Image (spheres, grey):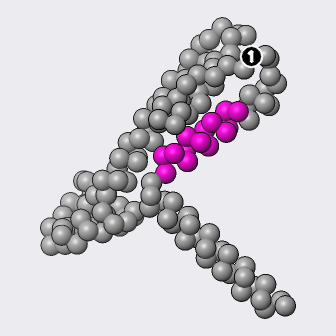
Amino acid sequence: MLILSVSEAKRQIKDLVEQVDQGDDVYYITRYSRPKAVMMGVEQYEDMVRQVSQLQDELARIWAALEAPPGEEEPILLPTPHGGARPFQPNRPVSPEVRAAIQRAALLAQHQRQRTAYQVVQDGQAALERARQQAIARSKTT
């Protein structure tokens, strides 16, 4: 979190726009030492809006499940290749652990699909760095 006054933001607006567009920086713009606005990149903002929407959907499903009569299990929503979701209901009764595992797998698949290219690149770079460090450590022990 970076804090700038309105006057500082005015002087640096061109650089600030570049920085938020290229990274995950968030700037709080203050006036008389009180936060008045937030500046972030469009991709970061859209990710945040998408996450809020998904959380609202999840809350609606939770409320619906809480209000459903006992014994009627809500179908599990599985992600589709086209970005949507389809309901899935096992053909036979399954244990709560199996149902929970299916739900976790569906949620993981949905989260993976929502990752931005920037996040994938960062994770790849981190994995390469870990592999490099492990290789260095192994070479020192042999």
Q: In the rendered image, which quarter is residue 100 located in?
A: top right
In the image as oriented, which residue stretches furthest toward the front? 81
Which amino acid, mark 1? Asn
Residue 18, magenta (yes or no): no
| x and y, in percent, of residue 132 in the image | 66, 80
Residue under label 1, please give it: 91
Residue found at x 55% / y 48%: 112
Specify the segment rendered in magenta. Answer: 102-115
Q: In this view, does 115 lie above or below 91?
A: below
Q: Is residue 21 above or below residue 130?
A: above
Q: Please indicate whether residue 5 sits to the left or right of residue 69 in the image.
A: left
Residue found at x 31% / y 58%: 41
In the image as oriented, which residue stretches furthest toward the top? 69
Instruction: Determine if residue 8 is in view.
Output: no
User: Is 87 or 5 nearer to us in this picture?
Assistant: 87
Residue found at x 25% / y 60%: 30
Residue found at x 39% / y 62%: 24
